[in-house]
Each structure stands twice: as C-alpha cells, then as structure tokens.
C-alpha cells in the first residue's frame, strides 16, 4: 500500500463539499406562485440531499429533491412577504454562504480542475519509489488433526510422494481441492506459529516437523519468495488524486496565509487552531 496514513486520510475524508454542480440546462421545472424552480436549482437540491436519500434510485431522488425545493420556495415566499430579507440574521447567513461558495468555486477551479493525469501518475511513481520492500511468500499446506498424521505425511513426502496430491487426499482444510495452495501472503496475515515456520523456510522446501497451531497440525511447502508487488496504478489512482488535491489545497491556503493576517483573539481558540494546523502539517 502507499503510505497508509496518507491514503486513509485521502480516501476517508473529503476535503470539501462542492455544492454547485455545472449547469448545462436551466429550464423551468416547476412553479410556486410567482417563483420558479429551474433545472439548475433542482440539480443543486439533489446534490445537497441527505446522504441516506442519495442512495435512492435517480427518479425517487429527483422527486425528493423537488419536494424539498418546493418547501423552500413556499416558505421563502412567506419570509420575503414578512420582510425577513432585511433581518440581520439573514444578512449574516448570506454573507457566510457567499464566502463559502466563493471558496468552493475557487477550490474547484484551482484544485479539482487543475489536477492533471500526469501529476497523479508522477505522485504515484514517487510514492512507489519510496515504499519499503516487503517480503511475501507463496505456500501450500496440509492440515490434519493429529501430530502422528502430520508425521506420516512428512514420511510420504520424504519417500517422494507429490505434495499437491497428498493435500487433496489428506488435508482437512477447505482449500484441499487446490492442493493446499494459500497463494502469496506477507507477514501478519497468518497465525504466528505458521508464519514463523514458513518465513524461515527455503524456496521449494517442506516442513520436516509438524507445525502446530490452533487449527491443528500443518505440513507446509514453501513454493516461492518475492518482494511484494506495489498496488497497480489503476487500483489507487483516485486515492493518489486525492493526495495531489490535498497538497494543492494546502499550498493555496499557505500562500493566502502568507499574504494576509490571521488573528485569533480568543486564546483557547488560537491554541486549538495552532495545534490543528500543526497536526495537519505532520500528516
């Protein structure tokens, strides 16, 4: 995996919610009194649905969004008639929303739309080059209930019998039909006793004494040893793109901070803000 802490941060945490989709069609889809609901407003309502409603089929999602948009228009009309557009609370909210949407549009233009495929591939190559080598092995095993059964199988192997055929005949593991093949795995994937034995073996060898685990007694054959291959680019491209976006966003923020003064008057908030920024810089 690419640097795990970065990938988890990138994959699991969205940097921003871009609330304004691109509008190609702005036809009127509904009217509420003198107020109109356009396609662009409906698209916006859809993009801002509750996450649970986002799981609905497309047509149901459109209906849910339209219903919400109509409710908004109905009460917005009453609020306008009541003179609430001049209310101080309304004006404060509109100023905040305007700032947020400017931030989001600037982010889309200078981060989301600015990331190129070449940048993503270059970042992938850089991360892969810095990955520490991790050994993995491919092994087969034959699982039996008793130590004597395992010793008898080892005797059969010493006599020249085929491991795959013995696995198919004698193993109690469900993978016996594949000749006991466990595929490739790295350290930390198997129970400790099994892992210790197999990683100490040479390629092509089999265990000369039974290996006991909580599952029973194993006879192991070590088929191959190699450095674990890195994740394929196509499998992690979106995660890497998130990393590139994150770096571009942080660079924009740092540039803006260098050009403008940020002053936090509340001491507790200032300490919390500074600590949060310190942790972010360390990720």
Image (cartoon, rainbow, N blue to C red):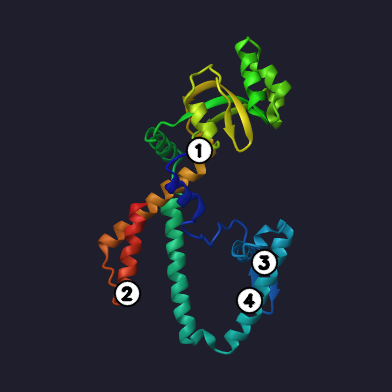
Q: Which residue is mark 3?
A: 65
From mark 1 to mark 4, how far is it between C-alphas?
A: 54 Å
Which mark, by number, is residue 72? 4
Q: Is residue 46 left or right of residue 273?
A: right
Which mark, by number, is residue 188? 1
Which mark, by number, is residue 268? 2
Q: Is residue 61 left or right of residue 246?
A: right
Q: Which quadrant of the figure has residue 119?
A: top left
Mark 3 or mark 4: which comes first in sequence?
A: 3
Helix or strand or loop: what does disc 4 sit on?
helix
The residue lying at 48 percent from left, 27 percent from top is 199
Instruction: Please state the horizontal and vertical placement of residue 5, each as a whole percent of the image.
Output: 43, 48
The residue lying at 70 percent from left, 61 percent from top is 61
Q: Is residue 244 left or right of residue 154?
A: left
Mark 2 or mark 3: which comes first in sequence?
A: 3
Instruction: Please state the horizontal and vertical placement of residue 130, each as a whole percent of the image.
Output: 37, 35
Helix or strand or loop: what does disc 3 sit on?
helix
Looking at the image, the residue that sits furthest to the top is 160
From mark 2 to mark 3, how far is it between C-alphas?
A: 41 Å
From mark 1 to mark 3, how far is it between C-alphas?
A: 47 Å
Answer above or below: position of 184 versus 155.
below
Residue closest to the eye, 79 or 190? 190
Mark 1 or mark 3: which comes first in sequence?
A: 3
Mark 4 or mark 2: which comes first in sequence?
A: 4
From mark 4 to mark 2, how far is it between C-alphas?
A: 38 Å
Residue closest to the eye, 113 or 61? 61
Mark 1 or mark 4: which comes first in sequence?
A: 4
Instruction: Please state the horizontal and vertical placement of residue 193, each as a whole percent of the image.
Output: 53, 34
Q: Total marks drawn?
A: 4
């Amino acid at each position: 995996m690419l640097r795990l802490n970065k990938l988890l941060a990138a994959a699991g945490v969205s940097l921003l919610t871009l609330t304004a989709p691109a509008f190609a069609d702005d036809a009127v889809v509904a009217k509420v009194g003198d107020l109109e609901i356009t396609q662009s407003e409906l698209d916006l309502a859809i993009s801002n649905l509750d996450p649970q409603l986002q799981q609905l089929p497309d047509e149901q999602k459109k209906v849910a969004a339209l219903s919400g948009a109509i409710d908004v228009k109905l009460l917005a009309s009453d609020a306008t008639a009541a003179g609430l557009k001049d209310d101080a609370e309304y004006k404060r909210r509109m100023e905040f929303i305007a700032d947020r949407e400017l931030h989001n549009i600037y982010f889309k233009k200078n981060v989301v739309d600015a990331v190129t495929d070449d940048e993503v591939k270059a970042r992938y190559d850089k991360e892969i080059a810095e990955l520490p080598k991790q050994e993995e092995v491919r092994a087969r095993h034959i699982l039996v209930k008793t130590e004597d059964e395992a010793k008898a199988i080892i005797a059969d192997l010493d006599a020249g019998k085929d491991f795959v055929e013995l696995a198919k005949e004698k193993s109690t593991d469900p993978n016996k039909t594949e000749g006991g093949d466990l595929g490739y795995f790295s350290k930390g994937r198997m129970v400790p006793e099994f892992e210790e034995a197999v990683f100490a073996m040479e390629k092509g060898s089999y265990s000369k004494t039974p290996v006991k685990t909580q599952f029973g007694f194993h006879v192991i054959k070590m088929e191959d040893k190699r450095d674990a291959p890195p994740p394929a680019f196509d499998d992690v491209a979106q995660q890497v793109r998130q990393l590139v976006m994150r770096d571009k966003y942080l660079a924009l923020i740092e540039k803006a901070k260098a050009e403008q003064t940020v002053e936090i008057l509340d001491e507790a908030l200032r300490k919390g803000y500074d600590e949060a920024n310190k942790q972010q810089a360390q990720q």
